[in-house]
Every structure is written in structure tokens, then in C-alpha cells.
Image: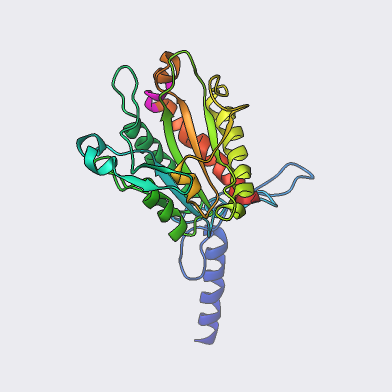
């Protein structure tokens, strides 16, 4: 019996070596290919659900780059705003002045609405950030509601203790202007002192990634080199977290409108914004 048991153990060990299975019969091990002479072994990416590659030394494995980070996405306006003027026109305090609770936003000449554009970009952007481990909070759940007010949108980011807040818009400037720009909070002493500098750093990261990823130029009609500082926007004035707005293009300009109306281009916009947020969150 003892000899038989020893033979069985040796046979089991031989089977494990030749099949690549562990003693418990679990999934396949990572395979190692034979490298060229002098090269380090290359490991195959695990194929089991939830597995992540080892990655390059010094880099975060996939799915962990933004682990522990909170991002608030604020898709501008809302699909039901136009039907409820009494609610969205209600004035609210944004420190520097009183402004309407919200607005309807703009649209292209063909009727593609800013609220729908902003919602679609946010919908595409959210899973890209979640894939890297971030917790993503939206200021509205769909494109059919009313509001929320600009004060409430800022409060959502503050309550979530967001590491970054990004408000997504399409501009409605004169048709001759084109390009994108990023809006930064201006200093309101005693209110947003702590977030002006990190917001600028966030804005720079978003600007660089957006220009590189979409190919759109800096705005020809607003700001300077793709940046504009404002103290008249409730979402920026009232934020206690790093926050910026991005005007993704001029929806009244024929060329910009064609791009912003294209689902494939909106996918590029989302990828570009994800890259900018990731750069900021990994270095900020």
C-alpha cells in the first residue's frame, strides 16, 4: 500500500508539470515563452476574469491607476430644462452674483442639443475611468430630467470629496469662432483659495490631452491658449474640490458641429478627457 501510494503521488506530480495545472485543479497558470538569448522571460496576460497583467515596472497594473480616486462628471444642462422655465430660471447665489438655477444650453444648426452631447460624452467617459479603478459620480442620472441647479451640482462634487470635477459642455459662440477651451476658477478670496492652484493643474492636464487626442485647436474666440479664468460660474465658484469646465467645441460653428455630432468623434473626446483626468490624478 505504501509503495502504491508513493507511485500515485509521483504520477500526480508528473501530470501537474505537464498540464500546467495547480494541485487544486484551478485555472491555467501564466505561460512563459522562451525569450531570445539574453532577454528576460515574457509572461502572458492572465485570462481568468478579474486578472490583471503584471505591467511594466514602475507602472500601475490595468484597473488600478485610479484606485481610490473619486471623479465627479457634470454633463451640462438637462433634457427637460426647456419645458420647465420657472424652475431653471430661479435665481441662485454663486457668491459673486445671482444667476439662473440652470439653462437650456445651445445646439448645432441641425438641432443636436448641448445637453444631449454632454450626456453622451459623460456616458462614454464614465466606464473608461471606472476601468482604471476610479469611483465616478454623475451630477444627473439621465438626459430627461430638470436641473439640478448649478449650486446643487457643485454641492455634489463637494459632498463626494471629489479628487477632480469635470463639467462637460459644447459652446454656443458666434459661428465664425472654432476650437475648444478649458475654464478655470478665478480666485474669490476667502472662498476658493485652496482649489485655484490644483484646478489650474487639472485644467492644464485636460487641455493637453484634449488637444492631443481630438486634434481640435485652441479656441479662436475665447481665452488664451485654450484656457480662460472665470469668476461668474457657479460650478466653479462654489466648488471646494479641484474643478474645471471644458467647452469641447463651438456647436454654432459648422466644422466643430460636424465633429461634435459624430459618435466616433465623441468617443475620441471621452478617451481624451479620460487621459487628461488620469494624468492629473496620478500626479496631482
Residue 259: percent from left, percent from top: 43, 21
Asked if residue 160 is among those painted magenta in the image, a careful observer would answer no
Residue at 47% x, 31% y: name it.
247
Residue extending farthest to the front is 97
**Is residue 54 positioned above or below 108 on the image?**
below
**Is residue 182 positioned above or below 95 on the image?**
above
Residue 102 sits in which quadrant?
Answer: top left
Residue in front for this viewpoint, 141 or 1: 141
Residue at 39% x, 50% y: name it.
151
Residue 7: percent from left, percent from top: 54, 76
Q: Magenta stretch mostly in which secondary structure?
A: helix
Q: Is residue 43 visible?
A: no
Residue extending farthest to the left is 83
Residue at 62% x, 27% y: name it.
224
Report the label total. 0
Residues in magenta?
259-263
Residue 31: percent from left, percent from top: 58, 52
Q: What scheme was used to colour the molecule?
A: rainbow
Q: Is residue 276 visible?
A: yes
Residue in front for this viewpoint, 283 or 148: 148
Residue extending farthest to the bottom is 1
Amino acid at each position: 500500500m505504501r509503495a502504491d501510494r508513493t507511485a500515485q503521488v509521483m504520477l500526480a506530480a508528473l501530470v501537474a508539470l505537464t498540464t500546467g495545472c495547480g494541485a487544486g485543479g484551478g485555472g491555467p497558470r501564466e505561460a512563459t515563452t522562451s525569450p531570445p538569448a539574453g532577454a528576460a522571460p515574457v509572461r502572458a496576460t492572465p485570462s481568468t476574469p478579474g486578472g490583471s497583467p503584471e505591467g511594466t515596472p514602475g507602472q500601475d497594473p490595468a484597473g488600478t491607476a485610479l484606485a481610490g480616486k473619486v471623479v465627479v462628471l457634470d454633463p451640462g444642462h438637462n433634457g427637460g430644462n426647456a419645458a420647465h422655465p420657472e424652475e431653471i430660471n430661479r435665481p441662485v447665489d454663486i457668491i459673486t452674483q445671482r444667476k439662473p438655477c440652470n439653462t437650456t444650453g445651445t445646439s448645432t444648426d441641425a438641432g443636436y442639443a448641448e445637453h444631449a452631447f454632454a450626456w453622451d460624452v459623460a456616458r462614454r467617459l464614465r466606464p473608461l475611468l471606472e476601468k482604471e479603478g476610479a469611483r465616478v459620480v454623475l451630477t444627473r442620472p439621465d438626459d430627461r430630467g430638470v436641473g439640478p441647479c448649478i449650486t446643487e451640482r457643485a454641492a455634489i462634487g463637494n459632498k463626494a470629496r471629489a479628487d477632480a470635477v469635470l463639467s462637460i459642455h459644447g459652446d454656443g459662440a458666434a459661428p465664425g469662432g472654432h476650437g475648444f477651451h478649458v475654464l478655470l476658477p478665478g480666485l474669490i478670496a476667502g472662498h476658493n483659495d485652496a482649489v485655484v492652484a490644483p484646478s489650474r493643474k487639472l485644467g492644464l492636464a485636460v487641455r493637453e490631452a484634449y488637444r492631443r487626442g481630438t486634434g481640435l485647436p485652441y479656441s479662436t474666440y475665447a481665452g488664451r491658449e485654450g484656457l480662460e479664468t472665470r469668476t461668474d460660474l457657479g460650478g466653479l465658484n462654489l466648488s471646494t474640490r479641484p474643478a474645471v469646465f471644458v467647452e469641447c467645441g463651438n456647436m454654432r460653428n459648422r466644422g466643430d458641429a460636424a465633429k461634435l455630432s459624430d459618435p466616433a468623434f465623441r468617443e475620441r473626446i471621452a478617451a481624451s478627457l479620460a487621459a487628461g483626468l488620469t494624468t492629473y490624478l496620478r500626479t496631482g
